[in-house]
Image: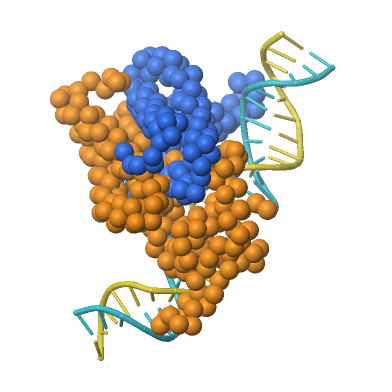
Chain colours: A blue, B orange, C cyan, D yellow
Amino acid sequence: MELSRTAYVILGMLKLGRRTGYEIKSLVDVSTRFFWAASYGQIYPELERLEQSGLVTGEREADHPRRRKAYELTPAGERALHHWLTSDAPLHLELRHEGLLKFFFADGLSPEEEVEQLRRMRAEHERMAAQMRAVEPAARLAGEERGEHHPLMTLEFGLAYNDFIVDWCRRLERRLAKGAPAEAA
Amino acid sequence: MELSRTAYVILGMLKLGRRTGYEIKSLVDVSTRFFWAASYGQIYPELERLEQSGLVTGEREADHPRRRKAYELTPAGERALHHWLTSDAPLHLELRHEGLLKFFFADGLSPEEEVEQLRRMRAEHERMAAQMRAVEPAARLAGEERGEHHPLMTLEFGLAYNDFIVDWCRRLERRLAKGAPAEAA
DNA sequence: CTGATCATGTAATTCGTTACATGATTCC
DNA sequence: GGAATCATGTAACGAATTACATGATCAG
């Protein structure tokens, strides 16, 4: 029974608690999104499939003021999640970075044009870092309350990661500003 | 005239010299692949489209021992490339990292299981770094000869980037080995 | 009462990979 | 002579985004 990565995102989120598709999507958008995104177009059909295969159970909540269907993990779902978490299958690793792609081809640009591009790339990573810092307090609180430290640690990684790229951009910008030679580090 | 990112990869590679589709693919596989991949299924049809729109010209090489079609940039192709390189359109930035995804959900794992996963993630990044180091001398030489420093600088970034992640994994592995508390950095 | 948010879903489209098919040439 | 590499292409499939449709409820 091969599951998609998105399926595991869902199983993982349900391990953290009973949730609707909408809630899963909202959570993803402030947490895993930075290294694994998911859209409604994936989540709802995948929930359907997971229920069909008995890895999750959905329940219409009659008490809730809104019409909604909340899901939780079945024992089989827990097992599937744990199996994936400990499996030695090759990891899907993928980076698509248009800023780096442009930089690769930047030999024809003037120093001014190049600095401008580096600034734009840096701005994007600063924006991401800011978004992460915005959710950090909530993540810290939730983590402490529930004894779950990994979501916060992943967030810290994301911050360090973005800072790393921001620093790299900044160094190059400075060097180019000083009538710089384009020599490597 | 909106072009795909893959189209720009091709234009960029042709800016560096006259090339066949096969050669472009080979080059991509040892250079941009780490932050922007491309397959034959994209390259050949895209070359066709680019020729149709007059951004590249292809020529059957009669002198060459093999039957092949080499392409080069037209002035319009050069302009399109330069326009993209200096444009302020939002950058496509995407990271998909199954290792981080697992780490995010790792609160249920035993320290041993977690260390094992971190090791696997580290191994993948070490492998990538090794691949980059393998092509580094050639990239350095080619860059010096032709005065094109950015491909090499991008490679150096890739190395630093992978080392950054490798270090992060290593730190956590050590902490976990010491009967570690899972506290954040 | 009105806009924001909660909530569920689907259809169309785009993007990209994988696998296959084919054949020539070069290296050992 | 046979394996590796050069070389071009396509078809099928899968993964994911975007946009759309729909409607209820909540906050001001």
* Location of residue A148 (image quadrant): top left
Q: Position of residue A117 (x, y in %)?
A: 52, 37
Q: Nearer the viewer, residue B172 or A10?
A: B172
Q: Residue furthest front?
A: A179
Query: Residue sitting at 39 percent across and 63 percent down?
Result: B26
Q: Position of residue D19 (x, y in %)?
A: 70, 42
Q: Residue furthest left?
A: B178
Q: How many marks?
A: 0
Q: Is residue B148 depicted above or below D18 in this figure?
A: below
Q: Position of residue B107 (x, y in %)?
A: 32, 28
* Image position of B5 (left or right of B112): right
Q: Inspect this view and state whether residue B6 appears.
A: no
Q: Is residue A145 depicted above or below A167 in this figure?
A: above
Q: Is residue B28 depicted above or below B124 in this figure?
A: below
* Location of residue A152 (image quadrant): top left
Query: Residue sitting at 28 percent across and 46 percent down?
Result: B129
Query: On the rendered image, what quadrant is the C terminus of chain B found in?
Result: top left
Query: Residue sitting at 20 percent across and 23 percent down?
Result: B180
Q: Is residue A13 depicted above or below C1 in this figure?
A: below
* Image position of A114 (left or right of A86): right
* Location of residue B27 (image quadrant): bottom left
